[in-house]
Amino acid sequence: MPFLKYFREFRILYGRYFWSGLALLTITNALDVIPPLIIMRGIDQITNRASEPELLKTALIFGGLTLALSFVRFHWRMQWGRYHQNLARDLRNRIFTKLTQLGPTFYTKNSTGELMSLISNDVESVRMGMGPGVLVLTDAFLYFVTIPPIMMTLSWSLTWKTLILLPLLPVFVHWLGNIIDRRFSLVQERFSELSGITQENIAGIRLVKSYVQEDHQTEIFNRKSRQFHEAALKVAWPESFMHPVMEFCVSVGVFVLILWGGRDVIAGTLTVGTFFAFHRYISKMAWPMTAIGWGFSLVSQARSSIRRIDEFLSTPLDTNTNPETARPLERIESVQVKDLSFSYPASNTPALQNLSFQISDSETLGVIGPVGAGKTTIINLLTGLYLVDRNKIFINGVDINDIPVSELRKQIAVIPQDAFLFSQTVVENLGFGLTELPSPELSRRYARVTAFEQEVETLPQKWETLLGDRGVNLSGGQKQRLTMARALIRQSSLVIFDDSLSSVDAETESTILSALKDELAGKMKIIVSHRLSAVRSCDQLLVLHQGTAEALGNPSEVAKQSRTLQELLRLQGHESDRL
Amino acid sequence: MSIAYQDDKLQSGTRYRDLVVRVAPYVWKTKGIFLFVVALVLTHTALGRFLPSLIGYTVDHFILTKKAEFLLQAGAAYLLIEVFRYILMIAETYLFQRLGLQVIYQLRSDLFSHVQRLPVSYFDRTPNGRIVTRLTNDFGSLSELFTSGLVSVFTDTISIIGIVVAMTLISPKLTLVVLSISPLMLWVSLWLSRNARDTLRLLKRQLARLNAYVSESLSGIKVIQLFNKESQTRQSFEKINESYRDFQVENLRYLAWLYPVLNGFNAITVAMALYFGGLISLSDAVPVGSLVAFLMHTQDFLNPIRNILEKYQTFQSSLASAERIFGLLDEPAEDLTGQKISENRFMGNVEFKDVHFSYSPEGGEVLKGIDLQVLPGQSVALVGPTGSGKSTIISLLQRFYQIPKNQGQITIDGYDISKLQAQELRRRVAVVQQDPFLFKGTIASNISMFDPSISEETVRQAAWRAGCEDLCRSRDKGLDSLVEERGANLSVGERQLISFARILAFNPDILILDEATAFVDSQSEHLIQQALKEVTRGRTSIIVAHRLSTILECERIFVLNQGRLVESGTHQELLKIPQGVYRNLYELQLKKTLNH
């Protein structure tokens, strides 16, 4: 039972808030049942023609007591609130920490939307269950053990007669609640469909306009929107019943009170004050009855949410390093791949098959091949994003599994194909991989190398320009050059270009490549590309085709052997077998 | 992604009055239901106020005078009124919801249809997520204002008025005394709830920040891990999370005071009613039963006030949503008007006459005086480095942007396109995008674009001519096979073939093709080249070309550089220009392997 496990843990962790909140709640409830009794006394005093000072005393007691009640009520709310807000914060922290530790195996299986929902909706539902849910149930319990006994001491027979319908209330609330929940999930489904087609329409707006489909698109949208509203209306029905039916049970109680209670007053066994007090208590009892239904549904939602959270938190991590054999890494001097085969966890076709190559210090390896040939897989394995078998990849002669991932990544700068930047300033993005922000000289130097220096000058706040949705949107090429600078500024010993220059034109590409020459001299490089011009001057060229090495060696020799390369040469307008 | 935009305007300058003015016409469309519901509310509130008086009357006239035989009648009357009142409440709640949903539906439909008509430049400068949020989440917030907010404020206000009236009927003097402290109560509770509302706003902003941070970290998780930034990211998150919790506790501080304060004031009111009422009653001015009724009314005060204050806090964010919705509705729509074209088809004589263009007044010119002519039926290639103005030319040809006066013109068969009906023009000039966009649906629906005027037969023929045969055969349902969102279950090559079929189905007079740069395998490449021949046959075609094989198929090549047309001619002619841009481009790709 994950719910109880976490509940116990948080109860201990935030015990101070938890127990003081509950204690204050108990006091509140104990005080809250008294006021009707005081009013009862007052009314009886009036009917019995008591003296004015006595009535004043009753009124003052009433006022004083309820004011005291207000104070206690404020404090239990605060204490209890602190308990469940802290609990929610803890859960969010735990989930986020886990998110940063999980690798791509996990992320390919789980969508961002699901994970977002876990950290927002599920945490919120656990908070509601363990906070207000538990509270409401306790509250209801306290009502049950206080109000009916008081009513019984006032009049035993009237108590059961007036409260007779109330036990049906939780059953009803629960039943209606279930109907609402069920229908509401349809509403949510319809809503996500509606936002789905909206998103699609906006993303394809040029196409819509291009083909003059505005009206048809509006029709399609209206159809979905109507479905959504129909679903919402189906929830409106049971919802509109909720309140009246709850009040109806009270009304029946009051009806009984007028009939039998009235008789008792006439017979002299009940005072008018008691009659009034009964009226108050019957109304008060409606709340704990509904609270049970509500509390249970909050807790049950929390239970399914905490199960999802627990399952997520116990996802095993891909750790390949055994801390006992782990060694630090100063610098990458050689990379050796021996007979490497690899399949992605969810796939049964191998992404790489029997691949071998070797790169030594200051050498450049070019990797080329069509989409899906396994180019990116090599990078994923070298950077430890996926686990690899032992004795397949060696860095400086040491098995990659014996090098801590963080040590490895410190020495490798990857420039990925899709340029991802954070919604921070330009200089913060540039220095993302450093421990502190880069100096202006350093920033300028790497901006120059990547032909980004002049572009920075055109930005509104230069280096301090905020990027992203709330700031400036860079063009594809600018983003690409900034991500390149961000990787290079770390001055790692191995630099990997993962088709990084695909979004700049050939001219810019050659400018960048020549500027990089000095910067990268003496470093090991792996250049993955689908463009021949990028890998022309490599020391070794690896041609991949469906996960196997079709050819490996000096570029001009490879051009003679490899059919894939010849095909590429033809398509990109090169004379075949010459590079 | 939508979450990130929620906070862009939480504080609203819109007043309730503006909202009422904008929404009133929509509500008035359903005036039948609206007026009926208002009548229901008034009836149910009036009945509700009648009840304590009924009990008071029973106490005075039946119980204290010992007339037990009337008790059943009194009780039955009580129960009957209650049941009737509940029926009214059910009807009223349901109808209010229905009314709200109808209004929202209309408003949403109007907004969507308006968005379809916004100029492309609007989409250029607005993130998609923001527009989607307007059409989805913002309406959620607005409809909350309708279905629960306004309704409860309305009924609760009527309730309060009803209570005061009922109390006054029992004893005006006592009512005046008892209500003497209510201004103070209102002042304190309004102060608290205003603070609660303001902290709620900050809280929501912080929540949006938190969600945005998580969402961005998830998108960039690979970068974070490759740069060893896990622990630093974690620390930043914890800081945001910590302050989110602090905001929550801060908000709670006001909320937690709100109800106890209301309760306290209400208790004082009741105590006063008890004491002063008692005094009056002792002097026989008011019978005990009426005093009981008076006390019941006094206690009923609490709920409606509490409800109103509770809703008050959410109102502000609904109001902000309303402002955003109406703001979008006020965005000027694209000017689509213009003259009709009398000919059935364009011949396809496209001419650019000294066209200058810039996307924004402060931005530089993207096109700096383009002059070019494409003859009917001709296929031409546009070639040039990134940023040379190729995409701008495509957009201008479909009138996605308007060329300002005296900045040149584009004509087709002699018509100035800026003076033609935009939609008419777009029907005749079709574009195939570089990365073809597909909608969720079937292959067939993507070819017909859900347009009911395109027959099944047309779709089938278009699909076959574009070479989609293999693609359909390899899937179990042929043309009716499912296409996922954005065509995620199809390869780049397949998406292109479908977009070619689309062209054939719509049969435009002029084709503009932005060729894909992605490298596909040779078999798909072959299919695409075949389909390309099919779609360009007999049709004026302007191709933004990236592949030599495509360029060589074209009859004429226009070379653009930095917004200018620098060279034009055939492949052979252009290669002869020493230091020419085309030659340079060509050489960069080839490097010393020139054998032509």
Image: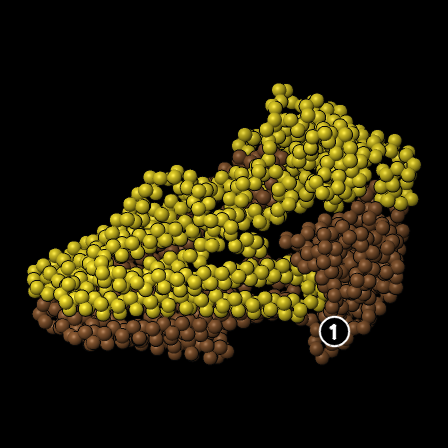
Position of the N terminus of chain B by quadrant: bottom right
Q: Residue at x 83, y 53 (%)?
A: A512
In the rendered picture, chain B carries what hue? yellow
Q: Quadrant of residue A178?
A: bottom left
Q: Chain of mark 1?
A: A
Label 1: how many Cα within 10 Å (few below 14, some 14–19, many 20+): some
Return the residue at label 1: A402
Viewer can see residue A161: no
Looking at the picture, which amino acid does disc 1 mark? Asp
Q: Nearer the viewer, residue A167 or A391?
A: A167
Q: Nearer the viewer, residue B171 or A333?
A: B171
Q: Secondary structure at mark 1?
A: helix
Residue occupying the far top of the picture: B342
The location of residue A410, given as percent across then percent down, is: 76, 68
Q: Residue at x 54, y 30 (%)?
A: B453
- Horizontally, residue A462 falls left or right of residue A86, namely right
The location of residue A354, given as percent across then percent down, is: 77, 61
Q: Residue at x 47, y 54 (%)?
A: B316
Q: Residue at x 31, y 66 (%)?
A: B266
Q: Among the chains, which one is brown?
A: A
Colour mode of the rendering: by chain
Viewer can see residue A43: yes
Q: Nearer the viewer, residue A126 or B313?
A: B313
